[in-house]
Amino acid sequence: MKNERVAVLDVRSFEVTFLIGSKGINDTFVFCGSKSEKYEGYSTDGFFDEKSFFEAVTLAARSVLKNYDGRIGKIYVGTPAPFVRVRTTGHLNSFPTKRKIASADVEALYDSGISELLEAGRVIRRSAMYFALGDNRKYFEEDKLYGTPTSLLKGALCYYFVSESFYDAVTSVLQTLGFSEVEFIPASLAQATYLLPQKAREGYACLLDVGFMTSTVSVVYGNGIVHEESFDCGLASILVSLMENLGVDYVKAEEILYSANVSGGYLSGDQVWTDESGATYSEARINDVIKYGLDGLCEKVQEFFSKYYREKTAAGLMSNPLSLTGEGIGSIMGAAEHISKRLSRITEIVAPELPYYDKPAFSSRIAVLSAALDGKKKKGLFAKIFGGKKK
């Protein structure tokens, strides 16, 4: 059983989580330890303070490892979207005569695809939206290709490059903790493939991860990300607005935010929120501040869809539900309803279907754990060398 356990580092924009887990029964997980630590965080421009990140990872990891009876030399790192560059390409390999497709043929397609892409950087993962053979039938699962005779193998391929700053910061701290091998997993892809059913991803699926400092919107097709963008909008910007507009400190702003509900309609000016000391604050004003912050995020999301899909036949894409996850969705009651109204589209909250972990705030760490365990089981799913290939 110990050989099936994996160590995971989940990096969010204000918190890191180190955990050791394994597969349980009925798609559950068994945890041997988990610890989260807050740090200064990051924006779309990078870490605010790498020393703070280093200290948080060290504290979280040592807290778990000191109580763990075993040794794990490899660790899987959930890499946030602001530190990942996604590149896509359509590529094909032809054969002189018909042959039965094997895993080596798929690997060759990926290798030649990235050579044609001519992108420089460190590749941490590659995946396919879909594959196709000579008859142009789409295959969303690689295994279903194997053994099929064809003279042509095509793929809509995705390559994920990690930023050197993130790679250096992570490997530096993990090497000091004794990990000899590090594998980076694009966190947004892990969330999309774990949280969204495969059938939903066989059409265009949209995922909005609302975080603390940053939020990310991803359009997913099959097992690949088509387009993705991150914004400096999240819980933090709303908390700052509450502090400025209500004249309260950070702790009070958190208390107000987590007790608010913006799903209702108009609030009269005489409705107030009262804290333990008896101080009162207008509920209408509180809701206005929170909605204004959510509106800022919605504007960014709308700009994203206009940028990539305005000129395309995107009726199907825009009619599909927008799946919401992340700590921002779980912390603001009514956020999903407000985003739905603001963007004029159906929204749904997605989270792990697990006891205790069935909250959007846990989506990232559970998805990365799931991807790590799947990668351990399926050879070739992720890059098998330290940190991926540098192209």
Image (tube, helix red, strand yellow):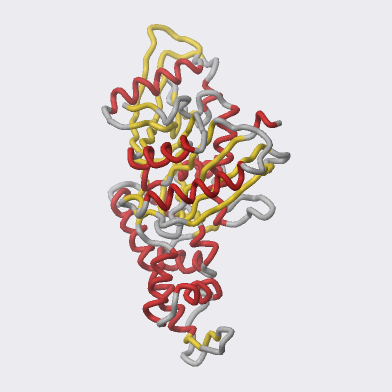
The residue sitting at 35% across, 56% down in the picture is 231
Say if 178 sits above or below 310 in the image.
above
**Extreme residue toward the bottom, this view:** 270
Q: Residue 11: x, y in percent?
A: 47, 48
Depth check: give the residue in front, 171 or 27.
171
Q: Is residue 356 left or right of residue 175?
A: right
The quadrant of the image that shows the C terminus is: top left
The residue sitting at 31% across, 47% down in the picture is 312
Say if 20 sits above or below 351 in the image.
above
Depth check: give the residue in front, 126 or 24.
24
**Extreme residue toward the right, this view:** 25
The residue sitting at 35% across, 31% down in the picture is 122
Q: Within the image, what quadrant is residue 157 found in?
A: top left
Say if 160 sits above or below 274 in the image.
above
What number of labels is visible?
0
Q: Residue 119: x, y in percent?
A: 28, 30
The quadrant of the image that shows the N terminus is: top right
Instruction: Answer whether residue 199 is visible to the viewer in this image.
Output: no
Q: Residue 216: x, y in percent?
A: 41, 52
Depth check: give the residue in front, 388 or 264.
388
Q: Residue 374: x, y in percent?
A: 58, 33
Instruction: Answer whether residue 311 is visible to the viewer in this image.
Output: yes
